[in-house]
Image (cartoon, grey):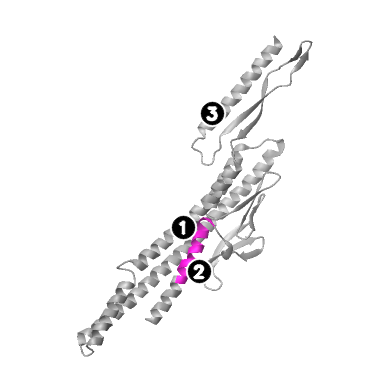
Amino acid sequence: MADLLNIGLSGLSAAKTKLSVTGHNITNINTPGYTRQDTVQATRTPQFSGAGYIGSGTSLTDIRRSYNEFLTTQLRSSTALNSDVKAYKSQIDQLDGLLAGTTTGVTPSLQAFFSAMQTAAEDPANIPARQLVLAEAEGLARRFNNIYDNITSQNSFINKQLVTTTEQINRLAQTVGSLNAAISSAGTNGQQPNDLLDARDEAVRQLSTYVGVTVVVQDDNSFNLSIGSGQPLVVGSTVNQLQAVPGRGDPNTFEIDFISGGSRQNITGSISGGEMGGLLRYRTEVLDPTVNALGRFSAEH
């Protein structure tokens, strides 16, 4: 009778724990980054009797996450790419609206200027026609200046966003470093701290919205994060930092420095992915060439 009672109690204990895990899943259904947890159940070691081995009940051996590393990595990569494209598109849409607009673009003013020039060339002695040429030339100059001012404002906005993005990256990197330490400590008993692992995965996913990161899992289950061309942003619980600083060649164009201990390295050209990567890519591929082309165009005309 005692054996039967123990078997029943083992089943009740397992069912109670499974209900607790189910309740935990339900409660955290809206928690960002939460991964559903399942229980793993196994039979207890049977006892030998003259008639053979008699079962002694059940026990829970593990509480594990329904986790797929491949899907998590794909989500992280897709998040970085999506943020990159969104940041790039939001800026290029503004520039396209500026240059292609009928009230802000340079084409209408150029057409009006050349039309006035044609009229004046046909009748050079016509005073009103000559005055119209001067007026259209002034209007064209104002249009060029307005476009340049808007482009300068866009560059200033990018500088401010780089500063803000850098601060967010540093904050999330510090969070990942702290979670690495907590996970490494909690895992010494051989079991995985599921909720801490979820929190770290979510922190890395959020980090991917700001910059592309490469994740390498260590033997103690901690994450090493690298950015750019392999600069170690997080190594275990050690966290390095990024800083947006005025450019060495042009103080009006901010660059990204990687700071590790007392050393500082410019990694602007190697940053990719996330909002920061999109802003830097837009500035390199679109904004700077546009400023140069606009300067040449205004000088030629």
Q: Which portion, as a residue range, is magenta?
A: 273-289
Measuring from the top left, give residue 218's x and y in whole percent: 69, 47
Kindly give the residue lying farthest to the right in the view shown: 50
Report if residue 283 lies within the magenta region.
yes
Give the CA distance from mark 3 to mark 2. Answer: 52 Å
Q: Main secondary structure of the magenta part?
A: helix
User: Disc 3 marks which amino acid?
Assistant: Gly
- Asked whether 193 or 120 is in front, the reply is 120
Q: Give the residue pinned by disc 1.
A: 87
Quick one: label 3 or label 2, which is nearer the N terminus?
A: 3
Q: Judge left or right: residue 234 versus residue 121.
A: right
Circle on res. 97: none
Q: Give the residue pinned by disc 2.
A: 253
Q: Are marks 1 and 3 in contact (CB under 8 Å)?
A: no
Q: Give the residue pinned by disc 3.
A: 23
Which label sits in the foreground, 1 or 2?
Answer: 1
Q: Quadrant of residue 145?
A: bottom left
Measuring from the top left, give residue 216's x and y in whole percent: 65, 50
Q: Is residue 118 visible?
A: yes
- Asked whether 165 or 148 is in front, the reply is 148
Measuring from the top left, give residue 229's x and y in whole percent: 62, 60
Kindly give the residue lying farthest to the top in the view shown: 1
Quick one: label 1 or label 2, which is nearer the N terminus?
A: 1
Give the CA distance from mark 1 to mark 3. Answer: 40 Å
Reply above or below: 115 against 63: below
Reply above or below: 12 against 142: above
Reply above or below: 214 against 246: above
Which label sits in the foreground, 1 or 3?
Answer: 1
